[in-house]
Every structure is written in structure tokens, then in C-alpha cells.
Image (cartoon, grey):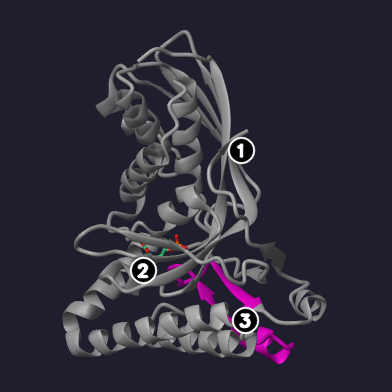
């Protein structure tokens, strides 16, 4: 396909999972929100066959002429970026060297979907070089990119970062169901980073083992997650924020039973509740990452977490975009 530009910039929002993480892999519904923090990707076409990747302070480069060997020249952070860029270019029957620069409003590993947002923004920027932006293709390629990192991914993170807004996401035999939730999009959350980075793939694997060893218990948990998520949609619809808050707490307790919380996350949730939050829970895979909380008095909550990485996140209606 014909290259129409020599450079492009694109971005994608980060996300929080409000309800249903982990069980979403096993075809139960989840609710996700895109937040007003983004990952930005700048790309420039090079005259040689080198991919040069800059992510925050990290700089790495390798030749695309020897893809199999080159893959191993990158660290775990930039290797999926390299492969995703390569695969996306191949979609356009193109072999080009690229300078790729990735910048995130929030540090990598905070459990807010930086990997999915990086991939989606990178794929968008590359598609823009050929002037062919198709959200469905970008979504599909972002899922492939996520599989390089998380192996077994539900597709929920790629869905929210490409689409933006507030969505209900469900994986089904017949394909993924993505329903935009148009109610309560004015909601904002406090996001608190635990300071512990973790591997989503490991946590997903632990849950897989638990499911294999205790199928009946897991089924019960999964049904509870579904019940909580469906009730949360009703609470969002009717703007019943007390109800929404108590459902968030129930969801956190369920994730505790699943074994993906820890003392640090539980303490952060307790601090939020003790400081007037209507609800709080870990968000994403758990084991570290971040918690979310919301309440009427955001100032009090921010103050309670003043020694942590904390910010107020509102819902970003926009998904991927060319900058
Ligand atoms: O680690 P995060 O915040 O990107 O969330 C992963 C969410 C899981 O449900 C645990 C995995 C998935 O693929 O949906």
C-alpha cells in the first residue's frame, strides 16, 4: 500500500475496570471506563531498515531485516512494540524502518492499561501513514498485540482503549459484545497507585489454576461477578451512587476471595472507605497496580492519599485519535 506521510502521532486513553475483571476472561460481563490520561506515540519513517524505540528513558534499536534475531535484542517492554509495529506494517505490505517514541501520562505498570493504549496508539499512527483508519482493524490488531504480553487476554482493554467512554464488555462464543453505557458518564474516580508493579499474565495464570482446582467454587464466584456487574449497570442507569459504591466493595471482596488482592490494596481500599468513599476496589489484574474509589468529597479522599501517587480521573469519551 502507498505510504502517504513520513510521520504521524496518535494517542489512546488509559482505562479503569469498574467491575468484572478476571471473570471477563471466562465470558462474564465487565464494565470499563476510558480515563482522561493518555499514551502518545510519535512515529517517523526512516531511510534504513531499523526500528528505534524510545519508551520513557529506555532507548533500543534493531534491524527489521532479521526479525527473529532482532526480537531478542529488545527488552520485555519494547519487544511487543517492535513486533506490533512490524505486524501492522505487514498488514500494509510494507517493510519500513521507524523511529517510535512512546510517552505516557502515567508510568507503565500502574495497572491502567498502558500496554493496550501503547499498542492501539502505535497501530493508529502506523495506519495513519497509509491513511487507512479502521477502528475494527485497529481493535483486532491491538488484541493480537496484547496477546504478546498477556497471552490469554479477554479483549476488554483493547476494546475500551480503542472505543473510549464507558462500556459493558462481554466475550462470547459468537464474538465480543461491546455496549456503550451512556449513563453516568459524568462520574469521576480517585485513582491511587499502590507502588507495586505486577504481571497481569501471572495473575491471570494463578486464577486459571484456581479455576482448574476448584471448578465449582470458581463457577460460584463467576456468577457472583456477573450478578454484581449487571446490578452495577442498573445503578449507573439510575445514578444510584450509594448502590454503585456498595457494589464496588462487594466486587473487591470477591477479588479478595479469588486471591488477587493483597494487604497493600486492601489497606488502600479501607483508607478510601474511612475517608468518605462510597465505594472502592482494586482495578485490573490486582496483585499491585491501582485502586479506584469514588465519593462526594473528592478533596478529602485526595488528602487521605497525599503520600501516594493519586489523581482524579474523569471518563474520556474519545478512544484512539490521530494527534
Ligand atoms: O492488568 P490490567 O489492568 O490490564 O487488567 C487485566 C484485566 C484482566 O481481566 C485480569 C485480564 C483481561 O484480559 O481481561
- Is residue 65 located in the magenta-colored stretch of the structure? no
Labelled disc at residue 320: none
Which residue is painted at 44% across and 35% down in the image?
123
| Ligand 1 quadrant assignment | bottom left
Which residue is painted at 44% across and 10% down in the image?
48
Of labels 3 and 1, the one closer to you:
3
Labelled disc at residue 203: 2
Query: How far across and how far down the image is residue 292, in percent?
Result: 60, 73
> Helix, strand, or loop for circle 3?
loop
Judge left or right: residue 32 versus residue 295: left
Mark positioned earlier in the residue sequence (2 or 1): 1
Number of numbered discs on residues = 3
Of labels 2 and 3, the one closer to you:
3
> Helix, strand, or loop for circle 1?
loop
- Residue contact at pointers 2 and 3, CB within 8 angstroms: no
Q: Is residue 23 visible?
A: yes
Q: Quadrant of the N terminus?
A: top left
Mark 2 to mark 1 CA distance (whole Å): 27 Å
Mark 2 near ligand 1 (CB under 8 Å)?
A: yes
Circle 3 residue: 239
Mark positioned earlier in the residue sequence (2 or 3): 2
Region of the chain picked out in magenta, as a range: 268-293
Amino acid at each position: 500500500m502507498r505510504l502517504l506521510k513520513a510521520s504521524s502521532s496518535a494517542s489512546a486513553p488509559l482505562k479503569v475496570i469498574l467491575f468484572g475483571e478476571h471473570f471477563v476472561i471466562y465470558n462474564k460481563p465487565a464494565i470499563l471506563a476510558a480515563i482522561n490520561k493518555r499514551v502518545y506515540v510519535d512515529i517517523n519513517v526512516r531511510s534504513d531498515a531499523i526500528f528505534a524505540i524510545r519508551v520513557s528513558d529506555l532507548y533500543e534499536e534493531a534491524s527489521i531485516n532479521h526479525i527473529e534475531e532482532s526480537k531478542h535484542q529488545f527488552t520485555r517492554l519494547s519487544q511487543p512494540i517492535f513486533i506490533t509495529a512490524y505486524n501492522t506494517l505487514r498488514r500494509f505490505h510494507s517493510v519500513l524502518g521507524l523511529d517510535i517514541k512512546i510517552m505516557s501520562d502515567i508510568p507503565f505498570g500502574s495497572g491502567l492499561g498502558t500496554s493496550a493504549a501503547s499498542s492501539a496508539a502505535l497501530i493508529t499512527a502506523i495506519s495513519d501513514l497509509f491513511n487507512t483508519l479502521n477502528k475494527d482493524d485497529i481493535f483486532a490488531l491491538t488484541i493480537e498485540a496484547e496477546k504478546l504480553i498477556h497471552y490469554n487476554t479477554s479483549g476488554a482493554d483493547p476494546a475500551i482503549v480503542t472505543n473510549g467512554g464507558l462500556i459493558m464488555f462481554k466475550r462470547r462464543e459468537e464474538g465480543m459484545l461491546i455496549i456503550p453505557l451512556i449513563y453516568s458518564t459524568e462520574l469521576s474516580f480517585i485513582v491511587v497507585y499502590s507502588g507495586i508493579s505486577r504481571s497481569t499474565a501471572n495473575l491471570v495464570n494463578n486464577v486459571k489454576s484456581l479455576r482448574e482446582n476448584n471448578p465449582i467454587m470458581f463457577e460460584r464466584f463467576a456468577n457472583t461477578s456477573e450478578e454484581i456487574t449487571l446490578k452495577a449497570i442498573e445503578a449507573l442507569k439510575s445514578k444510584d451512587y450509594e448502590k454503585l459504591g456498595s457494589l464496588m466493595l462487594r466486587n473487591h471482596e470477591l477479588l479478595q476471595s479469588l486471591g488477587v488482592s493483597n494487604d497493600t490494596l486492601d489497606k488502600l481500599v479501607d483508607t478510601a472507605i474511612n475517608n468518605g468513599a462510597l465505594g472502592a476496589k482494586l482495578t485490573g489484574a490486582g496483585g499491585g497496580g491501582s485502586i479506584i474509589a469514588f465519593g462526594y468529597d473528592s478533596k478529602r479522599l485526595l488528602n487521605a492519599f497525599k503520600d501516594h501517587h493519586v489523581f482524579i480521573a474523569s471518563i474520556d469519551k474519545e478512544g484512539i485519535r490521530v494527534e
